[in-house]
Image: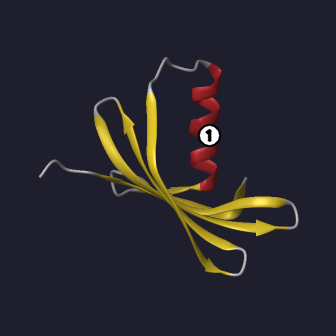
Amino acid sequence: MTAPDFWETGASGRRYSRAYVLDVLEERHKAPPAEAWEASDFHCRELATDVYLLTYTLAFNGRRTRRTTIWQERAGGWTALYHQGTVIRDS
């Protein structure tokens, strides 16, 4: 579900290629850890025809991040173009 030129900016600020992200997901799938993920605060906004910005908050292992994904509807279905995670610091 990712575009060939997909890339991600992680919560660390590092940039990750599509190939890297898919490799990490494949490794995690081999031995999935027991993790409790909680997603909330979903919002979706149309940016252009068939292009949408999805934002949400993710709580995982005591860390909260804001997540953003840009999706595009194509002939083959929905495709992720870009994803970013930003750590929420306690104020």
Q: Which of 46 and 18 is in front in this view?
A: 46
The three-letter amino acid code for the residue at tag 1 is: Asp
SS class, disc 1: helix
- Which percent across, then down, holds residue 10? 41, 53
Q: Along the line of sight, which residue is nearer the eye, 65 or 81?
A: 65
Please name the residue shown 75% across and 59% down the image. Answer: 78
Applied colour scheme: secondary structure
Specify whether 91 is left or right of 68: left
Residue 76 position by quadrant: bottom right
Residue lying furthest left: 91
Extreme residue toward the right, this view: 75
Residue 4, x across and y down, in percent: 72, 62
- Examine the rendered structure and indicate whether residue 30 appears above or below residue 81: above
Q: Quadrant of residue 28?
A: top right
Q: Residue at x 37, y 38 (%)?
A: 59
Q: In this view, does 24 lie to the left or right of 41?
A: right
Give left or right: position of 33 versus 27. Answer: left
23 lies above or below 6:
above
Identify which residue is drawn at 35% across, 48% down: 65
Position in image of residue 20 (x %, y %): 57, 47
Give residue 29's position: percent from left, percent from top.
Answer: 63, 26
Number of numbered labels in the structure image: 1
Alpha-carbon neighbours of circle 1 within 10 Å: few (<14), some, or many (≥20)? few
Q: Is residue 81 above or below residue 29?
A: below
User: Disc 1 designates what residue?
Assistant: 23
